[in-house]
Image (spheres, rainbow, N blue to C red):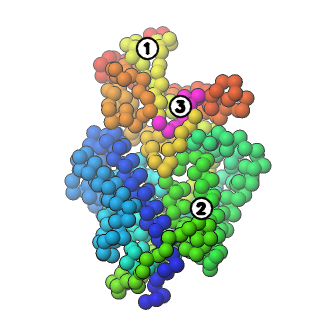
Amino acid sequence: MAWFIAPEYWFARQVLERGVAVVYVLAFVAAARQFKALIGADGMLPVPRYLARRPFRVAPSVFQWHYSDRFFAIVAWGGAVVSAALVGGAADVVPLWAAMALWLLVWVLYLSIVNVGQVWYSFGWESLLLEAGFLVIFLGNDSVAPPVLVVWLARWLVFRVEFGAGLIKLRGDRCWRDLTALYYHHETQPMPGPLSWLFHHLPKPLHRIEAAANHVVQLVVPFGLFAPQPVASVAAAIIVVTQLWLVLSGNFAWLNWLTIILAWSAISDSSAARLFPVPGAPDMGRGPLWFTVLGVVFAVVTVVLSYLPVRNMLSRRQRMNQSYNPFHLINTFGAFGSIDRVRYEVVVEGTDETVLTEHTHWSEYEFKGKPGDPHRLPRQWAPYHLRLDWMLWFAAHSPTYARPWFPEFLERLLRNDPATLRLLRRNPFPDAPPRFVRARLYEYRFSTVRELRDTRAWWVRGLVSEYAPPLASRRAPLARRT
């Protein structure tokens, strides 16, 4: 079936498969290193308690049959090992059916984690990874030429990511329409990076050009992915360049990198060869009939399931990052339909004093990624994902986001819980737990060029209000003295 194969996209398949496998490695490692305090058996939102209220059909997961922290660690680290093997090309040295089985395995393992992750795994890039991970199951390996239908479905996924994000901006905050969104975004985004201060201080006319270019890239360019070559390759290259710009300007986990990887599905090997040396493709067959049938069935199912995402994109009440089934297949995407004008941060503090007075000395907990110490330059963490830091950005917007887990987070600080402290950059009480902890809400803004020169501070902050009142450890009663 010559119509089913696209040998001119062999290198594109290599990029897709190896790239998705790299993201899987990062996702599994992040899960293994962070789960115990977040969703472990004694975590802030324990998996067993969550699954007790949700049957398999609602949250399909291997943990429905058994959960323990040790088993979760085996699943996460096992997924990382298999994904690393796929990065190294394991799928190309085994039979076709075995390669597909390996991709299916890592997809099932990560789906199992996401479906018990609760608010910690409620981000759009989780669904994007699962959808991309399911798609590569049907891309085949070096024994067969890339199936053209699956290559086109990868482009359809990129289209939904970009076009959905463009529509949500156009319909959302007015600042996107008057081109002023980037006056604020670099400063108020969830987790700024080391260059975000510089991006924020770019001239305002350039910010307006950025916003206008964003509309073109997300609302016009994606249609070029379905055009003949070399137009499709040019459209993909534009998306790649703009995504790299986003990589430089902030920390959005693996969202940008995965979009870059998927966009490569529209770049033909001949187009790529004009820019850099492309390895020669091996001898590839057309593949067995069963492989073709599976590819066609996958394409038909994708078309059917695309109805709801398309309807959502066309709706005036478009929703962002919506999954329509528990397998996170054929989702709708979108980001930053509204832009904050002011940045708020939750600052958590503790003290070892036994009695609270107006002179009590409070020491601040430092987080790995989110702004804290005004003199600390934001770090680059993406494509790694710091789940607690991201959720604290939402918590600063409204205590509603924090209500299910924040009180337990403070309780864990009061006993110097090792798993929780591993999520932080600095614990000011390494020898003994604090007597009290509290949280306060601050307004943050980037320092001006002059302020940075005079104070060496990247941020300027001011106290807004109390976020959580002092909480006593079980060692001592809560006592205040005026």
Element under label 3? loop
Work out which residue is located at the far right of the displayed protein and give it: 205
**Which residue bears the numbered disc 1?**
356
At label 1, which amino acid type do we have? Leu
At horizontal 56% and vertical 31% (from top left) the residue drawn is: 376
- Crowding near pointer 2: few (<14 within 10 Å), some, many (20+)? many
- Would you identify the image quadrant in which residue 97 lies? bottom left
Q: Which mark is residue 372?
A: 3
Say which label, 1 or 2, has the lower sequence index: 2
**Which residue bears the numbered disc 2?**
240
Place of residue 41 in the rendered image (x, y in percent of width and height, measured from the top left): 26, 43
Which of labels 1 and 2 is toward the front? 2
Q: Mark 3–mark 2 contact, CB under 8 Å? A: no
- Return the residue nearer the eye: 373 or 97: 97
* Any part of residue 53 in sight: no
Q: Is residue 456 magenta?
A: no
